Amino acid sequence: MPGQDQVVRFTGGPNDRPVAWATVGAGPPLVVGGWWCGHLELDWQNPLFRRFAGLLGDRFALVRYDRPGVGMSGSDGPLVTSLAGEVAALSAVVDAAGEKVSLFGGSSGGCAAMAYAAAHPDRVERLVLYGSYARGAEIAPAEARESLLALVGRHWGVGSRVLADLFLPTATAAERDEFVRFQRAGLTAEKAVRSLEAVYAFDVRDRLAAIEVPTLVLHRRDDRAIPFALGQDVAARIPGATFVPLDGTDHLPWRGDVDGLAGAVREFLGAGRRARQAGSPQLSERELDVLRLVAQGLSDQEIARRLGISTHTAHRHVSNIRTKLGVSSRAAAAAQAATAGLL
């Protein structure tokens, strides 16, 4: 997978607009996409992105796509900004990719993924949401949203730097400069404004109770682009969803603790597990108590206070749980436990 190149194809999307989609890897199809600013070719040139794709694509046929009017899906054409248009584009890719798929909806792309999963449960195996939200108007106060839109529209050069600071807070100056160039290559100032307006306008609250497929919601605690509380809200609205908090501030999933994030996704989707004996891993009642608190995002110290044990004992329980589940991170442990019905 690391040395493998992507294969780009085109399929008919909303209003007969072409939708570019790429696939790499082998296995069950996992459709990833819908970023407000994306480009199949330029993303693939980013080594951090390719590493993230490799962590998933060695077990899945990883499918990505550019929204109509963005990137390789006809950047000169009009932009699709309605939720219905976004879902239609995703639907076209799902139809082209396979009979039944798993979905990875990141950021604003999570809205289209949630709406599609609610409407087409027969086409979705599992749903993973990362850095997601249910109502875009809650991302930031109205004044802050209007100020950012005005800045992007009038001074796209400055606006793209502000967005780079928001999305990549831990990046070096060179990495931020590269992301600025990426945004400006993918979107004009006008399209950037319209895309951001769509991000803020999406509202899928009325769709979430209808989602029937197993769902994993991941969110970084200090995400500066989409507040952590909005991810919690999404998980609370989807019946039976598992919420796994992650440490970090970067909004893009291919930055920060990529291994922990990808491990949680792989465990939830059932990929890359070691052969195990039939049945659920044998955890003690105390270990199950600890695991439930891990899934709530509590640290070892917080678990110790909640259960009235020492921090050392809490740490030992967590280590034993990870060993029994055969996973390398707390996030993956929570995802595996949800898959095995232990939570």
Image (cartoon, rainbow, N blue to C red):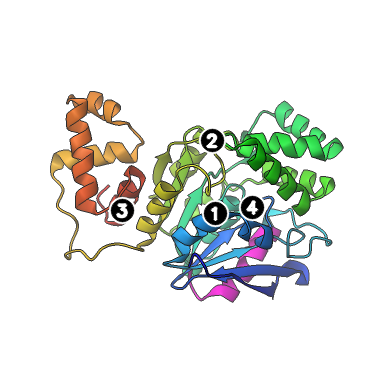
Q: Position of residue 220 (x, y in %)?
A: 48, 38
Question: Considering only order in the chain, which callout, 1 or 3, is on the residue closer to the N terminus?
Answer: 1
Question: Considering only order in the chain, which callout, 3 or 2, is on the residue closer to the N terminus?
Answer: 2
CA distance separating discs 4 and 1: 9 Å
Question: Considering only order in the chain, which callout, 2 or 4, is on the residue closer to the N terminus?
Answer: 4
Question: Considering only order in the chain, which callout, 4 or 3, is on the residue closer to the N terminus?
Answer: 4
Please state if 112 lies on the left or on the right of 249 as rendered: right
As for residue 136 lying within the magenta part, the answer is no
What residue is shown with label 2?
223
Above or below, 324 against 180 in this view is below
Q: Position of residue 139 (x, y in %)?
A: 62, 35
Q: Main secondary structure of the magenta part?
A: helix
Give me the disc on residue 35: 4
Above or below, 94 against 181 in this view is below
Residue located 74% across and 43% down the image: 197
Element at badge 2? Answer: loop
Task: Tell me which segment is drawn in magenta.
Answer: 85-101
CA distance separating discs 2 and 3: 24 Å
What residue is shown with label 3?
336
